[in-house]
Amino acid sequence: MLAVVYEHFGTYLVPGLKLATTRWVHAGTFGVMLFFLVSGYIVPASIERRGNVRDFWIGRVFRLYPAFLVTIAIAALLALLGPGWVPASLSEQPATSVLAHLTMLHEVIGAENLQHQFWTLAYEMVFYLLVTVVFVAGVHRFSAEIAVLLAGAAGGACYRLVELPFQRLGRRLVQRLAHPA
């Protein structure tokens, strides 16, 4: 967390240090990757400890959504008062934008973030879904083998080749849900 805070505020708090370290390391990327690495151990253990998917997801909802909704409320208040920023997609397609954000899969399906920092939530949610599938399929006992397989697949995949089709598909799905014919 401190690495991400340093990335966002280091320029203002310690500009000389931030300038010197930026050439060597991107603290924000390091902090987020470290968070995902730790989550890779904690989240599967959490679902196994609970022993069922329902309790796992109830825990996720109560852990994520309160802060998520408070952040959205603060952002909306700032936008109403003037200094905030509202993405064009929210005013152009409010139902689609809101539905995409309520799933927390907005970034994955190509919806514009209400807040830039929300991008991590979408990837966290994808990870939770993947862990759920692994648990339900009963293959969580082979987690080391799965991790190696997924790391190899991720290393070999081209980001743009994977990203664009899923964004188009996800955007169409959310638009149909928001505006049924």
Image (cartoon, rainbow, N blue to C red):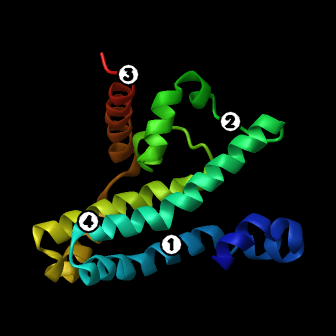
Earlier in the chain: of badge 3 and badge 1, it is 1
Earlier in the chain: of badge 2 and badge 3, it is 2
Q: Mark 2 falls on what kind of element? A: loop
Residue type, label 3:
His
Residue type, label 1:
Met
- How many discs mark residues in the rendered view? 4
Question: Circle 2: is it few (<14), some (14-19), or many (20+) Cα within 10 Å?
Answer: some
Earlier in the chain: of badge 2 and badge 1, it is 1
Left or right? Give the position of 152 relative to 119.
left
Q: 78 or 172, which lies in front?
A: 78
Contact, mark 4 vs mark 1 (Cβ under 8 Å)? no
Question: Circle 4: is it few (<14), some (14-19), or many (20+) Cα within 10 Å?
Answer: few
Residue type, label 4:
Arg
Where does label 4 land, which residue? 54
Q: Which mark is residue 86?
A: 2
Select label 2 or label 4 by which is in front. 4
Select label 2 or label 1 by which is in front. 2
Question: Circle 1: is it few (<14), some (14-19), or many (20+) Cα within 10 Å?
Answer: few
* Image quadrant assignment for residue 170: top left
Question: Is residue 132 something one can see in this rendering?
Answer: yes
Contact, mark 3 vs mark 1 (Cβ under 8 Å)? no
Spatial separation of the CA atoms under disc 2 and disc 1 = 28 Å
**Residue at figure coordinates x 36%, y 82% from the top left:** 41
Q: Mark 3 falls on what kind of element? A: loop
Where does label 1 land, which residue? 33
Select label 4 or label 1 by which is in front. 4
Q: Mark 4 falls on what kind of element? A: helix
